[in-house]
Every structure is written in C-alpha cells, then in structure tokens.
C-alpha cells in the first residue's frame, strides 16, 4: 500500500528567474537545461537508466532521430566511470548495485557487497523516509538493474528469489515490467516452486494488471503490472501486443507515486538497448532508444510542472562499442534504420533451412536489396542473427567493436534541483549518494 497518500494538484508552473538557470543551451522544446545554483526541497527523484547506452549510441541516435537533438543533450552535466569491484568491465548487476547503493561489488552480484553483506539501496532509503517508490523496466522486472533496488542476492540469475523479495519486503509500491513467470507457481507454468506471488501481492493490496488497457485505467494505489511471461517485446514488435510503452509505464507510475505528499523515488530502465548492443542490432538499438527518450520526456514534463523533482539519466555501461561509421560500412545513411521493422533475430527466424530466402527476408523487413555476396555470407555464417545485423549496420554506416560490454565512460545527464551535485567526471557510486543528499535521506550502509 502507498505510504501517506494524499491527492494534491501539480504546481501551476516552475518559477525560476533567468538568474537561477544555467547558461547552457535550451533543449529542442525551448525548456531550460539543468538548474545551476543549489535548490532546496528535492522531494522526488526520477532515475532513468538506458542499459548499455554510451556516447556512441547518442551520436548515432542524433542522426537517426527525425526532429532534432535528443532531449537530454541540453542537460548533460558530466561523465561516469563504470568499472566493478573485480573487473574493469562491469556487468549490469555490479553496475546497478553501485548505482543503487553507492558501493562497488563483484560482477553478477545484486545488492550485496563483495563480502556478501546486504546493502541498502537509494529506493529503500526513500521508502524509509516515507516516500513512495517505483520500478519500471521492459525486461523482466527481476532482471539485474531493477533487481538491485529492491533485493539482495549473490547471483543475478536467481530471479525467483528476487521476485520473492520484491513481494515479501514490500518496499516497492509500483512494479511495472515483464517477468510474470517468476511470480507464478510451477503448477501454473511459472518458476516459483511453491508460492503464488501474484495472489500474495493482491492480498497486500497491490492491483494486478497485465496489459496496457488495465494499466491506464488505474489512478491510485499500489500496482503490480506484469505484461509478459518473460521480457516485454522490443519496441520494433510492440505494436498490436497491448503491452504499454516504456513512456506509458513511466507516466502511469509518476501519476500514482506523485500523490504522496512526502514525495517519491522512481527508477525506469530502458532495458533492451543493452540487448540490441549485444546483438549488434542497430535498428533495435535506435528504436528502443527512441522509446526510452519518450519516457524521459514524461519525466521532464512532470519535473517542469512540479519544481521539486530531480531527473537523472545515465547508462550503466556501454554495450557493443557502437560507433558512427566503421570498417566496411557502405554509407552513413542512419535514417534508413527507420525503415527496419524487425530485429535481426526475428529475421533469422524467418529463414528457411538452407537460408536460401535470405535476400527476400531482408528486403521485406529491412527494405534493403542485399548483394549475392552478402546473401552468401549470411547463409554460411555460423550465427545468422549477427550476420544479418552486421549487413544492415554496414548499410546504415554503423560500426561495432564488440558483442559484449566495454569499459568506456558513459554520459551523465541531470535536470532540476540537485543537478549541481552531479557534474564533471563522477563514479557510478557517486550517483545514489548525490540523490540521497538531494532528497535528504539516509543511504548509510550498516
């Protein structure tokens, strides 16, 4: 149940004089960039994490986008380092733990120190202070990044236990994403050995929803929204599914959480940018970045009206080493990716046994007339998904250096009161500490 809920109207306007706004450029909508001088009364934090996103993605997306620069370009405040406790290249569990708790841990670990001690997250600190809390993701909601904010396990793969902790501990008021199987008992086709976590959540006064229409009907109260058995669909495939968009989940969460007079903390993950990077799938990466940007706009619109909300946007690491241009690219016509209607994996699944229809498949779903040599390469390559994605990337002028995470720093964006706490080169452990300072909540680890 939401804590101390009170319906209150949004303030009529964000009253800032020109002297209180940084001299940075306005964004594409003419709104101010990040607020410069220190402001008081940060009641809410909206933490948006585009998993796997880096400067390479941003440069590529700038040219993919049809109507101006990415909204976050106007409130860039710094860069963030991403290494984990035991490796220069982090995974999402260790990166997320640092970004949620302020403590470095080992790759694969969720919400625990390298010594196995449970860590308090910024979400839990906000909950202790009486604020409402929410988690939104288009992966399973038990995946590594959302998991670090509300659970403590020694392995990110233990999603069954992560789900149990989310319901048992009751610190998250709004839970929206995929992963219904992790909340259902095995006898109903789920992954829980004995328990029915959805029924238990209902007993705790959560409203359970499993499609877009049901979510948009809810106006108040705690919500458990599980919109797919496993991960939600990539943005390329979402149309016709009745799954809510990332922006719709974000907006719904804000509408409900903002009714608490003591404020709220919300984490939103654009999960599948990372998966697209692992697959070197440029069209998937760009379409899911676009869906993520729409969620960021929902947060910024609320922050502009509210005046007491800090919005932070930062990826947990880079995935794939995407670049604008690269070896063997045919052009820099990134806009052509807007004509791609399916992921490389989906296209590979449409190939017949000998892959002799590869030219027809790519023409249908990517609007590209590939050469005979390119078709032959896809037919012979061990991994047809990667082969298809590399051909499409080459036509678009997109390069990749890896199918895994890289160690490069990622851009950090902060908007609203408290943004002055996140400037320059920071470490991922600095971000939740700055949020705790801005909200005046206690993130001290035991």
Image (cartoon, rainbow, N blue to C red):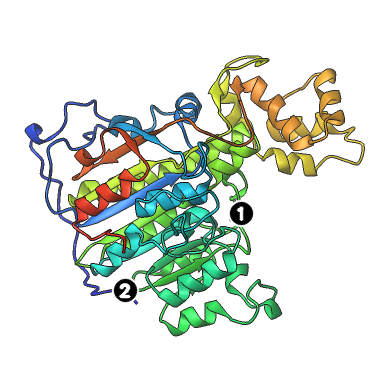
Disc 2 packing (10 Å; few <14; some 14–19; many ≥20): many
Looking at the picture, how far across and down is residue 295, in whole percent?
40, 47
Tally the marks. Answer: 2
Disc 1 packing (10 Å; few <14; some 14–19; many ≥20): few
Q: Nearer the viewer, residue 63 or 41?
A: 41
Q: Nearer the viewer, residue 259 or 219?
A: 259
* In the rendered image, the vertical position of residue 101 relative to residue 292, given as above or below: below
Q: Is residue 330 left or right of residue 201?
A: right
* In the rendered image, the vertical position of residue 79 relative to residue 174, given as above or below: above
Q: Nearer the viewer, residue 129 or 234?
A: 129
Image quadrant holding the C terminus, namely: bottom left
Q: Which residue is mark 1?
A: 240
For residue 5, which quarter of the picture? bottom left
CB under 8 Å between discs 1 and 2: no
Mark 1, secondary structure of its residue: loop
In the image, which disc is placed on residue 2?
A: 2
Looking at the picture, how far across and down is residue 162, in whole percent?
52, 66
Q: Is residue 112 left or right of residue 398?
A: left
Image quadrant holding the N terminus, namely: bottom left
Q: Is residue 14 left or right of residue 113?
A: left
Q: CA distance from mark 1 to mark 2?
A: 32 Å
Residue at 48% of width from left, 49% of height from top?
A: 94
Mark 2, secondary structure of its residue: loop
| Residue lying farthest to the right in this orientation | 354
| Residue lying farthest to the front in this orientation | 115
């Amino acid at each position: 149940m939401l804590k101390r809920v009170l319906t209150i109207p949004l303030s009529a306007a964000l009253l800032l004089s020109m002297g209180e706004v940084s001299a940075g450029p306005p964004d594409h909508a003419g709104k101010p960039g990040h607020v410069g001088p220190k402001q008081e009364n940060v009641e809410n934090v909206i933490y948006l994490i585009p998993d796997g996103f880096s400067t390479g993605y941003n440069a590529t997306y700038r040219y993919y986008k049809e109507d101006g620069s990415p909204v976050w370009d106007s409130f860039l405040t710094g860069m963030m380092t991403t290494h984990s406790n035991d490796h220069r290249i982090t995974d999402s569990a260790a990166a997320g733990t640092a970004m949620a708790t302020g403590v470095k841990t080992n790759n694969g670990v969720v919400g625990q120190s390298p010594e196995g001690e449970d860590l308090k997250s910024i979400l839990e600190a906000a909950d202790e202070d009486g604020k409402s809390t929410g988690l939104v993701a288009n992966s399973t909601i038990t995946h590594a990044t959302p998991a670090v904010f509300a659970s403590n396990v020694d392995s990110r793969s233990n999603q069954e236990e992560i789900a149990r902790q989310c319901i048992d501990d009751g610190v998250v008021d709004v839970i929206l994403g995929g992963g219904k199987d992790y909340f259902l008992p095995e006898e109903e086709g789920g992954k829980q050995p004995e328990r029915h976590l959805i029924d238990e959540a209902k007993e705790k006064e959560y409203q359970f929803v499993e499609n877009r229409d049901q979510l948009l009907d809810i106006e108040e109260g705690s919500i458990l929204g599980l919109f797919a058995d496993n991960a939600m669909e990539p943005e390329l495939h979402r149309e016709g599914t009745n799954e809510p968009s990332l922006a719709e989940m974000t907006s719904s969460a804000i509408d409900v959480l903002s009714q608490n007079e003591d404020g709220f903390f919300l984490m939103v993950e654009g999960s599948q940018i990372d998966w697209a990077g692992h697959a070197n799938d440029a069209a998937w990466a760009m379409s899911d970045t676009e869906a993520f940007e729409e969620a960021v706009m929902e947060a910024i619109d609320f922050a502009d009206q509210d005046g007491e909300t800090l919005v932070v946007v930062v990826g947990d690491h880079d995935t794939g080493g995407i670049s604008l241009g690269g070896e063997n690219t045919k052009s820099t016509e990134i806009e052509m990716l807007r004509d791609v209607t399916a992921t490389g994996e989906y296209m590979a699944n449409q190939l017949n046994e000998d892959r002799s229809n590869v030219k027809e498949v790519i023409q249908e779903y990517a609007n590209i007339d590939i050469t005979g040599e390119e078709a032959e390469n896809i037919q012979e390559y061990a991994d047809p998904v990667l082969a298809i994605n590399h051909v499409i990337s080459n036509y678009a002028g997109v390069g990749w250096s890896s199918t895994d995470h890289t160690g490069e720093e990622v851009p950090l964006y902060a908007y609203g009161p408290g943004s002055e706490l996140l400037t320059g080169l920071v470490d991922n452990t600095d971000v939740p500490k700055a949020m705790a300072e801005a909200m005046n909540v206690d993130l001290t680890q035991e």
